[in-house]
Every structure is written in structure tokens, then in C-alpha cells.
Image: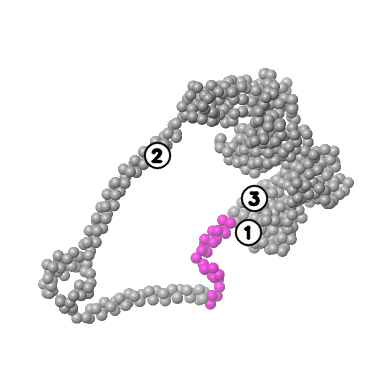
Amino acid sequence: MKQIDKYNLLELFHKDDQQSVYMAINREKESEIALVNEIKRNQLMPDFIFEELVRNLTNVSFYELGSELVLATIYNEGTPLKTYLDNYQPNNQTRFNMMYELLLKCSDYDSLPGNYKSILIDPQQMVYKNDHILLNEVILLKDLENASNYHDKLRNLFYLLLDELDSPKAHAILDYVDSDEFTETALIKDIFKKYRNLYNDAAQVQEKDEHLTAFVPVGVDLDSDEEELESFEEPLDSFEEDLDSFEEPFESYEEDQEAYAGQDEPDADDEDVTSTVLPIPPTELDDFLDDDSADFDRDEIRAEPDYFTEHRKALAERSLTEEKKEKRKTPWLLLLLIPLIFLIFWFIFYTPEKDPGIAVDFEVVPFTNGWMFNNKTSTAEDTTIKRYLWSVTKDGVIIETFETEQAIFQPTENGEYTITLVIIDSNDHMSESFSKTLMYDGFKESDAGEVEGGDGTSEEVTPIPEDTKAGDVYPDESTSKTGKASVRITDPSDKFYPVLSLSNIFVSSGDVASMWIKTSDNKTVELKLLGYKDGMLITDYTFAHEPSLADFELVTFTFDYSGADKVVLEIKSDNKYVWVDSLIVETIK
């Protein structure tokens, strides 16, 4: 069944001599509405432009290259952009975010010709839904000839979103939009970067201004008249009143002291004499006791411990107790640190015990553009293989590593390569390393002195065994799209299996991974691209391919992250066999 048969064509959206565009609904998923664009082959839509559209449009549902070019894109329902702006009046930050999102999405169109970019960057094709701007990417060939400059379309978008804002950020951005620098910037991606930098620079300036006025009350203008400033002074007056009320307890205390000084001396026989005597500091106590004019029993008072002396003793004893506790605590800390230090050294210097009982072996399966390595290691009956450690060395330098049961390596130059395998079993025993040295001469030098791909290695290609099991990957010389051997995986239905990898590369945001896919049963293929940096997984992305032909079809993916130096392709599918040919990552300019 063709992909277009999955849709019910509802109504004719547009029709002329060059194309027909239909509104359609997915038979299996009724909530999905699509625009099916049937284009006659002509000079306005050459095949390479059509392939670029397939690569860069964000809403592609399926495509076909036959007697006609068929391109289906998801139709996004929502509020038209202009209607949303007029009726809802979004705030400043929402408008900045909308502009950010639009530039980010439109930067996918950088590799398209200018007239195609112009008809795609159109507010009439933009809707707002669930806090996001969605693009309805309708290509009408009749609009290509009279398409305006895409810089003008972008400029109109900037003014549509930001012109009403009285903000330093908006002013700085619109000044740039009106400058020659904007018109001379060819890539929308670079315009997006400039927009982001201008926004951040203006935000920093605004933040500095806010710091300078941090002590100015909200709503008070320093240039306002005296009445407003006098109204601002009212809190200060109330604060002074609070201070006056706070001083009252001290004044009442002084009055109590004066009243107490005017009282008669208490009789010595009163029971409450001690309760009326105020505490006397120790420095004054001795002078008081040495005063011969006082009428009291000096020895009795000296025998009573004064409060301050006892308090000092208590503080001294508590300090001594805490010091002893700290001294007792130190050995315990040392005891706790010893096993921690041991664990750290064990983790750094520990290597699994080498077990001579592990018989390491692997077979080499050559094909046109490299080798595949199949593990043939045997272990003891009560153990299993826990890890595979493959390494490929050239001129004494490790250039590739793998940790899968099967590994595929594609040389980039002629020469001698050493393949090494080390096994770690379920008991953490490490095997001795086992190596094979291979010579690759697949790159031939032509008469003109240029290096080009040859017919293959000096060895014959090993045929695919008939008893392959689920997940087995083998090169297949008999099935190819690019003229070299493709890679065939058997029955990858239960999980994702690694198929191909690219190393010693640098992936930038916007780079495109492409491959040719063929299936045995025309069933869905799930693909997973894993990005690694210095051996660590930094990102992964899973997407689906719906085959529409019985032959190879081009499948592409645009990266939205940067920094990966290795890419691994994994596949899962209910097809009996899936073939993959020519995985490449390239920068589309």
C-alpha cells in the first residue's frame, strides 16, 4: 500500500496546470490533517530542490518521487498569527519568545533558494496554538516567480511582533533589522544568532539600570514635584514615631530607678531583703564589702557565691567539655576516612582479574568498504560475557572503539590496521587481549593522481550465512543503492540493534544525517541516532520511517545539537530484513 492510500482526500485546496493540493485526513489517526501536494515534474521543481524540501521542511509526513512529485505536510490548526496578535494583545515577553521561535524554525530553510524561503516565511502560513507558533508549509509554484525578497518577509515579521513595544530590546533589534548588516546576512541562522545576542545585550543593560535605581521607591519619579516627595517622607515620620515609642521602656526603667533610690533602707530583719538588692558586679563587690560603715555580716556575704563567678565557672567547664568532645571525635573521623580512602584507591587502580580460561576469538567478514567483526569467544560454563572491548589501532594510535558483540569498521585510508578484542565475563574476570592485523587497500590511486574508492579489499567477500539469528548484521554485496555493499540486519524486532557508526567527526546543529533504507516486508522501521562525545553518550533521537517503495528510499535527519564526535545508528523493526546503505553526516550550505 502506498503512503498516499493512508489518507482520505477531502477537498481541493488549490489546483492549476502545475500542481494540485488537497486537504486530507489520516485513515488511521483521524486527528491528523495533511496537505497533499501533487506536483508535475518541471523546471520550477527539479528533483534536487524537492529533496532539499524533504530534508528541511519541519512538517513532512511522507513523499514520493514517481511520475509526479508527491509531498504531504501536516496541516496545523490554530489561531492565525495576525488574528492572535490583534485580539489577544500578548505581553512583551511573549512577543520576544514568538520571534525567537520563528527565527529558529525558519533557519531550517537556509539551504533552500530565496524564492522558496520567501513563500514559506509568510504570516498567512503561521498559526498560534498551545503557546507555540506552528508553520503550515504550503508550496504553491505560482507564487515562486513573483516572490519578494525573503529579507523583506523577515523584516515584516519583526515589525509585526516588536514594533509596538516601547523597550530598549525592541529598539535595538529593529535598528539592526533596518540596517545594511541585516540585508547582507545570508543565513537565517546567523540572523537568529544576532537577534539572540541583541536581546541578551539589551537585557544586561536594562539589568544594570535596574541596579542603579534599586533604592528608588516604585512609583516615585525623582523629577516629580515637591508634593509627591513630601508624601514619600510620610513613612519616615511614622518610623521616627516608632523609635519614640521604642524609647519609652528605657524612660520608665530610669523612673523606677529614681523611685527606688528615694526609698528608705530596708530593715535587716526583713525576709525580702535579698530580693530587693540589685546584682553588683564582681569588681565593685570587694569595695562594697571593705566599706567599714556598712552594717552587715561581711563573712556571711563573702561565703555566698555570687552569680557572675558561678556563671564564669559554668562557661569554663562547658568550653572544656566541648574541647574534650572534639578531641574524642577526631579519631572517629579518621577511622571513617580510612575505608573511604581505600575505596577511592580501589576504584582507581583496580583491574579485573585476568582469567586464562576465557578463549578470545573473532572472525573478520570483509566487504567493499571495510570489515565486520563477529565475536567467537568461549567462556566457562558457569559464566557469561559481560563486556566486549574492541579497539582499532593504526600507526600505534587507537582510532576507534566498540562495546558490542558485532562491530563494523570502515577505513578512511589505505594501510595496516590492528583489531584487538578484550572480554570481561560475569565474574569480572578480564581476558588476555587477542589481536588480528588487517591490510586495507580499497582506495586506489587514479592516473590523475587522485585517490578514489576501489573495488574492495584484496580478500573475497564472505557470503551471508543462511542460519542468521535475530540482530545479526552482515554486509550484502548483492543489495546496494550506491554501488558499494549495504549492511543487512536480520529480524531486529525485539530491541534496537547497532548497525552502522561514524567516528572522528564533529556534528554541528543543523547538520544532516542521511542513509538509504530498504525493507523486506514494507513495514515501519524505527531508527535511533546516538551521539557520543569522548566516549560518553550525550544525546539520542528516535524517529520512524514508513516505507512507500519496495526499493531503497532516502531517509534524513537534521541534528539540533552540537559537539558529538561519533554517531551510531540503531534499528528496530518487524521486517525480516532491513538494509542500510551509505550513512553520512554532512553540512548543508
- The three-letter amino acid code for the residue at tag 3 is Lys
Nearer-the-camera pick, 256 or 78:
78
The picture quadrant where one finds residue 317 is: bottom left
| Position of residue 102 measured from the top left corner of the image (x, y, whole percent) | 69, 52
Q: Residue at position x 24%, y 56% from top?
A: 316
* Residues rendered magenta in the picture: 203-228
Quadrant in the picture for the N terminus: top right
**Res. 194 mark:** 3
| Position of residue 195 measured from the top left corner of the image (x, y, whole percent) | 65, 52
Q: Which one is closest to the eye, mark 2 or mark 3?
A: 2
Q: Residues within 10 Å of mark 1 (few under 14, many from 20)?
A: few
Label 3 secondary element: helix
Colour scheme of this structure image?
one colour
Magenta segment includes 172: no
Judge left or right: residue 564 versus residue 69: left
- The three-letter amino acid code for the residue at tag 1 is Gln
